[in-house]
Image (cartoon, grey):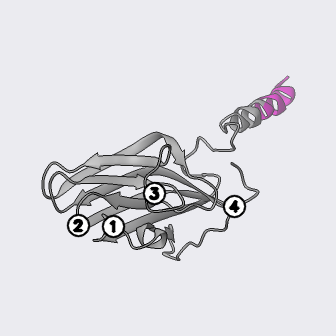
């Protein structure tokens, strides 16, 4: 009986482990996401009137290596959390997805209003935000002031989920 029970328990554990992933292939285990872990940084001024879509982008780096990440047209960014720090009060900061420098309907990922100098706003998403294929996360703010922001998550490469 004992010999029969061990394979059955093993099979049940394998099935339960497989159920820890949703229909999009996103793992419930944050230490083993279905993609390359990254962090993104945005540091600077000029996000109130960015000169181009590229100027509004976050710089993306592979976690643990610091190597820059360049997205392919089919790659998807999945953001799990973000943080912003602003150098002025009453500044509207938006992190968004999209093809230009304007925050259009359905593109906003995070929105914060700084209450005072040095306001720190942060969020950990209970449901990660998935960007459009090939799209970089961007930042836009309402004043010409220093804004520092960071994001974390993972990049899903073509053929690996989503």
Rendered location of residue 110, percent (x, y): 39, 47
Q: Secondary structure at mark 3?
A: strand
CB under 8 Å between discs 4 and 2: no
Report the residue marked by disc 2.
144
What residue is at 15 percent from the left and 59 percent from the top?
88
Over which residues does the magenta segment extend?
A: 1-11
Extreme-top residue of the structure:
1
Vertical placement of residue 11 versus 73, above or below: above
Which of the two discs, 4 and 3, sits closer to the camera?
4
Cα separation between marks 4 and 2 = 33 Å
CB under 8 Å between discs 1 and 2: yes
In the foreground, 154 or 109: 109
What residue is at 16 percent from the left and 48 percent from the top?
115
Alpha-carbon neighbours of circle 4 within 10 Å: few (<14), some, or many (≥20)? few
Cα separation between marks 1 and 2 = 8 Å
Cα separation between marks 4 and 1 = 28 Å
Rendered location of residue 147, percent (x, y): 27, 64
In the foreground, 10 or 96: 96
């Amino acid at each position: 009986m004992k010999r029969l029970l061990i394979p059955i328990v093993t099979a049940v554990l394998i099935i339960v482990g497989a159920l820890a992933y949703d229909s999009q292939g996103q793992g419930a285990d944050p230490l083993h996401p279905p993609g390359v872990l990254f962090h993104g940084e945005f540091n600077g001024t000029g996000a109130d009137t960015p000169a181009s879509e590229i100027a509004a982008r976050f710089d993306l780096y592979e976690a643990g290596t610091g190597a820059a990440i360049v997205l392919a047209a089919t790659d998807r960014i999945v953001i799990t959390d973000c943080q912003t720090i602003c150098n002025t009060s009453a500044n509207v900061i938006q992190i968004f997805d999209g093809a230009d420098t304007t925050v259009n309907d359905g593109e906003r990922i995070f929105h914060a209003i700084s209450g005072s100098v040095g306001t720190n706003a942060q969020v950990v998403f209970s449901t990660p935000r998935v960007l459009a294929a090939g799209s970089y996360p961007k930042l836009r703010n309402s004043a010409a002031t220093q804004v520092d922001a960071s994001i974390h998550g993972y990049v899903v490469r073509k053929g690996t989920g989503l």
